[in-house]
Every structure is written in C-alpha cells, then in structure tokens.
Amino acid sequence: MQARIDQMFRKRNIEEFAVSILEDMDGVKWARSCLGPIANRDAPNLKCYGCNEPLSFVKAHQSTRNGIKHDVKSFYRHLAGLRPHCSSETLAHKAAKHALEIHKEKWNFYFPCGICHNPIRIEMCNQYDTIDQEVTWKQYKLDIGIKREDHVIGAIEVLVTHTSTASKLYDLTNDDVAWCEVHAHRVLDAVKKNTFEVEVAKCAVQICDHCIEKEKKRVFQELDRELMRSAADASMLRQKRQCIIQKATSQWQQMTPTESHNDEQKKWILLTQYVQKSVITKASELGLCTEDASTHAGELLDGELILHFGKHKGRTLLSLQKEDWPYLLWLAGYNFGTMNDRGKAEKRVATNGSKFITNELETEAKNIVQGLCFNCQGDICDFDKQPWRTWCKRCYAQLRYN
C-alpha cells in the first residue's frame, strides 16, 4: 500500500490516489436485505450480492490520510478479515434481479413507440403470477421468469454490459412469450427513488396500437391508389390499342388494291405490304412485339378480311375461330350455332348489327366454318358427300335427343 502511495505522489496524481483509497476500503454500493436491495442506509442481516458474506454499513464521513482530506460517501463494507473480489457487474446484475423479484407488483415498464415516441405500457405479470430468478426455459436461462400455472409466459432480461442474444429473443417472440430487457442501473435507480417506473431497453412490442392502425390505414390507402392507377393505366392502354387498331385498319383499307387502282398503283401497294410484313417479321425475331401481335399483323398483311364493326372490331375472321366461335357462326349466317326442332341449324335473325355484314364477309365466314362441327369445331366425317351437315354424329345425337 505504501509503495503504491509513494508511486502516486511521485506522479502527482491526487485523483487516482483518492480512487485507489476507495477501492482499498472495499466499498459496496448495494446490499441484500430481507426487503430487497438497499443503498445508503442501515438494516439488519445485510449480505453481499457477490459473495453472500455479511456486510456492515459505513455512514458518509470525511477522512484524512497523509494530511489530505476527502469526502467519503456512505457504503457497505465486508467484515474484518474478509477481502473477497466482488465484481461490480455481478453485484449490479444480482441486485437488479432481486429487486425485480421482491417488488414484482410495483413495477411499471414502458417503451417509447418507434413512430410517435409516446410511452407504451408493458404488462408483464399480475398478482397471481409467480416470479423466479434463473428460470430454465428450453436451452436458455431467463434472468427473471414469469410463470402462470407452471407455464412461462414472460421474461425479464437484466442488462449490465452484455445484451441478450438475438436467437434467445427470437425464440421468446416466436413462442408468444412476453419479454423485455432492462438496464440494471435503471432498475436500481427506480428502487432508490421509490418510483418503480423503468424505461426498458428492448421489448417485443415496438409500435403502439394507435400507430399500427394508422400505418394499416396508410398501407390500405396506398393499395387503393395503386389499384386506381392500375385501372386507369389499363383503360388508357385499351384506348391506345383501339386507336392503333383503327388507324391501322384505315391505312390498310387505303393500301388494299381495288378495281379503281390501275396496275402500276397495285404494284406499289403490294410492295408497301411486303415491306411492312418484313418489318413485323424482323421485330418478332428481335422480341420487339408479342407473338399474337405479329400473327395478327401477318394476317392483315396477307389480305385477311377484318371486321370494321362490333365487339371484335379490328380482328380477322380466322382469329374469331379460337376467340369467339359462336360469333363467327353468326357472321356466316347462322343463329350462333343453335338447332331448331327438326335438327337443323337456325338461320341468323336480322338485327341492327347484321346490316353491317357484307356478302363478302358472310361468304368468307362460311368458308371457314364449312366442314366443322358447330358444337365442338371438330371435322365432320364424309362432309364431301354430305355438304349440308353442320354437326358431327356424336354432337348431333347429344343435341337432338338429350
């Protein structure tokens, strides 16, 4: 001791000297009593949280050593002859756990909301729950375990220097075990001030109910706006597509050779068609247009008839064979493929829309549907010998007798 004092005086470090004296006096800030951890006051049967040995209370006083006066705060000292090395980290950790256990019904924990920063009250236990230290749960040890009917429903982890592992907190959350992590010094300060209100460092709840509802409302509003934007984009896309089809149809009509064109004009029109078809073919190879779009354009360039009215305006007759077979039968002069009482296909009923069907269009539609069953679109056997037939034998039997 004297050697250390001599060395410190040689360095002229008075502050280090004062700290060293306090360490040599074996001071302990918190002591265990039957009422829980206490500081700065005397009580019977005081023991050390580190070594569980008896302690004596030393009041605050002024001490003089080697002519130097300094104030000494009140502390707890081990009995004479006992010089254990009790870690301050261990003392604080055990004292905080003891305080949580002994005052279980007094504690009020809260955590600031991650959005609005208002305190979130954390209910850890009630008067019927039991609290124990060092509770075994799965492969972990809980600093404070809260049990209800022998089932762990909550956990309080005491933080001094090392936080709880992420896997431990994840398993607690995954098993619906309420948990929070508190600093030991905040627990002990709440005991000292007799407030028993502590802000936790971590907990399973990060956002208050009000902010959760507010965030849900915001997300739903954003989804509604996204749906409205998608619907508006789809409507605009349909309008643009229809406009392109109408313009292409008008241009195609102008490029289709008619009897009014002379031979020289017909040659230039055909040349323009071949150039456009080559461009579309190359665009399809480069992936610049879809297969359906290139097929439809190819049909137009090959001179296929297209509709200039109705719900399939701008489509070719061949495309209707897959998309809308009954509509193609209507264009061909039949009543959408229905059968009368005598087993024959009904003729088309005159309507406002039928007046737009030209003879050329009806003839082309008939050429497509001839030889195909009006019901299943399958080939009709012996159609060359019986060209009046409109149904195959199997579909005719089903439609006629069922």
Image: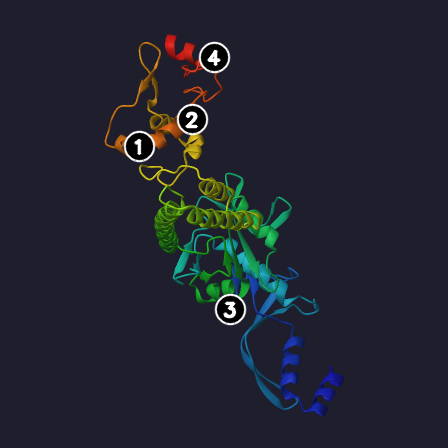
Three-letter residue code for mark 1: Ile
Label 3 is placed on what type of residue?
A: Arg
Which residue bears the numbered disc 1? 357
Q: CA distance from mark 3 to mark 4?
A: 119 Å
Neighbour tally class for label 3: few under 14, some 14-19, many 20 plus, Cα within 10 Å? few
Residue 303 seen from this side? yes
Residue at 32% from the left image edge and 9% from the top image edge: 342
Can residue 402 be spotted in the picture?
Answer: no
Q: Which residue is mark 2?
A: 367
- Point out the frontmost of discs 3 and 4: 4
Q: CA distance from mark 2 to mark 4?
A: 17 Å
Report, in whole angstroms, how far the alpha carbon at label 3 lies from the one at label 1.
107 Å
Against 57, is 356 above or below? Answer: above
If the image is split into quadrants, where does the C terminus sit?
A: top left
Q: Looking at this rendering, what residue extends furthest in the left direction?
A: 352
Nearer to the camera, 109 or 12: 109
In the image: residue 294, left or right of residue 337 = right
**x, y percentage for residue 40?**
52, 70
Q: Earlier in the sequence, mark 3 or mark 4?
A: 3
Inspect the image, locate mark 2, and give the three-letter code of the amino acid beneath it: Asn
Q: Alpha carbon of mark 1 to alpha carbon of mark 2: how far? A: 15 Å
Residue beneath disc 3:
41
User: Which quadrant of the rendered structure holds the N terminus?
Assistant: bottom right
Res 249 → quadrant? top left
Of tags 4 and 1, the one toward the viewer is: 4
Report how far apart the C-alphas of labels 4 and 1 lie in the structure.
30 Å
Q: Looking at the image, is mark 1 or mark 2 earlier in the sequence?
A: 1
At which x and y percent is residue 26?
A: 65, 72
Q: Which disc number belongs to residue 385?
A: 4
Q: Secondary structure at mark 1?
A: loop
Q: At which x and y percent is residue 80? A: 68, 70
